Amino acid sequence: MKARYLVPLGIFIVLVVFLGIGLTLNPRDVPSVLINKKAPEFSLPDLFDENRVVSSESMKGKVWLLNVWGTWCPECWREHGFLMYLKGEGVPIVGIDWRDESAEAKKMLAQEGNPFLAVGVDPESKAIMDWGVYGAPETFLIDKEGFIRWKYAGGLNAELWRTELKPLMDQLEGS
Amino acid sequence: MRRLWFVFFLLVPLVCQSSIEAYSFEDPEKEARYKVLIDELRCLVCQNQNLAASNAELAKDMRRLTYDMVQRGATNEEVVTYMVDRYGDFVMYRPPFNSSTYLLWIGPFIILGIAILVLAMIIRRKGQEQTPVTSDADLQRVEHLLNPSKDKSA
Amino acid sequence: MIPEIGHIALILALCMSLAQSFFPLVGAHKGIPSWVALAKPAARANLLFVLVAYGCLTYSFLVHDFSVAYVAQNSNTKLPTLYQISGVWGAHEGSLLFWALTLSVWTAAVSFFSRSVPDVMVARVLGVMGLVTVGFLLFMLLTSNPFDRLLNPPMEGRELNPLLQDPGLAIHPPMLYMGYVGFSVAFAFAIAAMLGGRLDAAWARWSRPWTNVAWVFLTLGIALGSWWAYYELGWGGWWFWDPVENASFMPWIVGTALMHSLAVTEKRGAFKAWTVLLAIFAFSLSLLGTFLVRSGVLTSVHAFATDPARGVFILMFLGVVIGGSLMLYSWRANQIKSTVKFDLVSRETALLMNNVILVVTACSILLGTLYPLLLDALGAGKISVGPPYFNSVFVPLTVPLAILVGVGALMRWKQDDAALLFKKVWIYLVVSIVLGLLLPAVFAPTYSFGAALGVGLAIWVLLTSFNWLLDRASGGRGLLQVIRNTPRGAWGMLCGHSGVAIFIIGVSLTSIYSVEKDVRVEAGQSYNLGGYDFLFHGVENFRGPNYQGARGTIEIFKDGEPVTTVYPEKRNYTTGMPMTEAGIDAGLTRDLFVALGEPLGDSGAWALRLYHKPFIRWIWLGGIFMALGGLLAASDQRYFRLARKARLAAADQVTAGAA
């Protein structure tokens, strides 16, 4: 048998293997390029007081979470309860209220509780673009030196907290 | 993750229709560059559209940012670098030329090269072959298969 | 009750297709005439059952049976009847049923129109098509049953994707499917020929008309899709190199190569192994397209709702069908001895070069389409491969192809004299170069070498193609007589190649000379673009059957004379999905295109997008010419003469086939 007639079959088999791996991946998931990079600075007007500024500066030396949310995002409502739980655990969370009606946002926090140390408003995606965010909710973990160590696109939950986030935070706190 | 983009669909159910902003430019060169940029940058929400065609809120903001940067005199490279620094290579419809994309950019040339090589070999061999006899027999047999009636009358 | 009948019909169709593949294939192998004879009735019964199933689903749509999940998800009582009918193929499950239906139609057509082909061969062909049908029916029954019921049927259904609520897009998928599935006939003929161990010119002649017809459907399907994108998506583009567009374009390119290669195999007995491989490729790429669209491995505007189980099934199916046929190929291709001789300067070489360029193009598109997936699978990051890449690969490859189009047909089989050939064409060469360089300088607003290249190439293709006709007249016969004696196949070639020239003009002039502008206008204001004044009269709201609309009125003037008035629309469907309907004034040499944006502020100002697109119609016109060419070629009399003669000589047919 001449080998050259096997070439198409060979190429096809390689292709099928890749397509098979492709089935296990999510093509829409764009990984952040910012992991282990210095967190972008932001300073946004405070949701509750336009004259105050919420900035990444004030979080220096802490291990903290940045959560991007909006009242227009159903998953954010689902996640909210868990953020309240994290607040109870003493996790410092800064919120960015993205492209939202401030009145609506205030109403939601009044109703459902406010898990955030501070909430900056970002009506024109200025800050979130620096963070490479393209959907909500999205959460970043920043360490004491101000480096992004972890990111999650989608609603946080107990499982994730137990298996990934908590161990990582403990480790970062310790260092 | 799967959940998240399901949410996207509920939330912005294909609002990926083109949106029109009517930005004004004094400098036609800048306008042309802006057009090229929003054509070649990919929207991250409606992932199969460029910024120009997407109506997602984020795409609007990204267009405005592009407009602002171009108006301030940023070069195309600066705008693209700005986006790539934040969203990664995914945001460019024109893939970069680096170690992981060598094959992509050079691949067509390799395929063409191999094809031309094979072609040259075949043509050389075909020019040298001396046995057209069997092929005629083959053709006759085909003719018989296809055209038995002619065969019979002959 | 009706949905259950549909479901049962599907199961029966599966049984039929099992019988249709098992008995004929085994019977042909072992030489059992009664088993071979089962092929045709089984194929026709299969069509009958699939038709029943399809009828049941259509009926469920028409009577708004929302207890059927598929109907509830894709229609509601307010949906116009036309879209109730087209809604059947509007989403995953139903479109799969439509796929199966087209496959059965093609299969039954082969069973009716292959009287000139030996029974054993037909049996094998139908058997192979039966195997493909089995795969699709199983896929449907196991993972995507369109007849699934809802326990608590809703009072009102949801909505058919508004993108599909358009006459153009309603018939675009059927055309595409007819094309994709049509390539299964050439594929089945190739496999049957390999199974029979006889890879001669006969299978090529039998499968040529089928391939042509399939290609015609695919051409029209793609052209329709592109036209639809142009007027519906509102950004004036006609091709975006989206993965799904590529998925339809790759089989088209390979199908084009196949048509030409089949010609060589039939007429000269050359490239036998290669032609078989192309037949396998063309259908494989159709199947791959199905996989890409329905498995969710690539993101696309056109993608169906995805489910990993479906992806796994189609991948396995791909593995069996393509892997199996390539294995058979690697075994059988060995035994083919091609002994046909031809020279460097000959029509064979020209067609081989055409094949090489087409296949290289298809491979490059495949590479670009799958590359993001490959990188992701290797964990090497996410990238996007879009229009900039594909254009820079596709355009340079088209140039040598266009140069070959006309000359190829002028060359003689076996061997030609290069000097003689040059003597024939040098004048055309000069004319196309001069006209190419000159025309843009005279007529275009700005000079562009790209436009010169495009125009020059198109003229070259036209001149050399028609020289072929003159060439035939040179033998002392009058032109009229030649025209009368030229077979349809040859007219098909002329027509198809003219389509290429028209297409080249359309693409190059549109992409170079289009101008667009996004403007803010208030009622009574006008804007000048491309020599036309667009006068905006304002926007009024109206109510459609299942949407809220806003319609703008724009009057267009040229030099103060009114040209036309266009009415671009914006629609908000009940599902909350907005759609734009551009206002277009179509013309042979230019389109004027207005898309309505959003209201800006409270002053009655609106955002408008204006386009002046020269020669854009020529893109689709080229497609129509190509399709017409394919149709002419497929209807060439000799295929029918053949069938008639064969019927007369049916008696000694059997022995020839069974040998």
Image (tube, coloured by chain):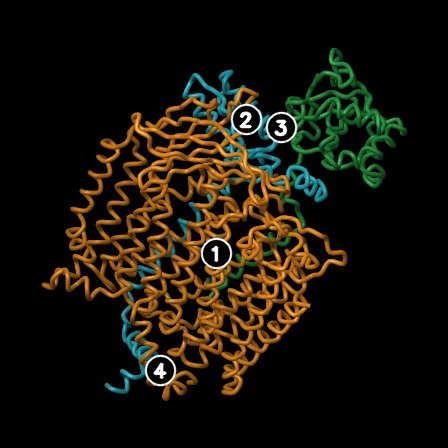
Chain colours: A green, B cyan, C orange
Depth check, mark 2 against mark 3: the one in front is: 2
Judge whether C459 appears above or below A48 on screen: below
Residue identified by numbered label 4: C647
Question: What amino acid type is highlighted by mark number 1?
Answer: Leu
Residue identified by numbered label 1: C176
How crowded pointer 4 is (Cα within 10 Å; few <14, some 14-19, many 20+) is rated as some
Residue identified by numbered label 2: C599
Residue at mark 3: chain: B
- The quadrant holding residue C645 is bottom left
* Disc nearer the start of the sequence (1/2): 1
Q: Secondary structure at mark 4?
A: helix
CA distance separating discs 4 and 2: 69 Å
- The quadrant holding residue C204 is bottom left
Residue identified by numbered label 3: B86
Question: What amino acid type is highlighted by mark number 3?
Answer: Arg
Question: What amino acid type is highlighted by mark number 2?
Answer: Pro
Image position, residue C167 (x, y; %) = 48, 50
- Asked if badge 3 and badge 1 are on a common chain, one would say no
- Asked if badge 2 and badge 3 are on a common chain, one would say no
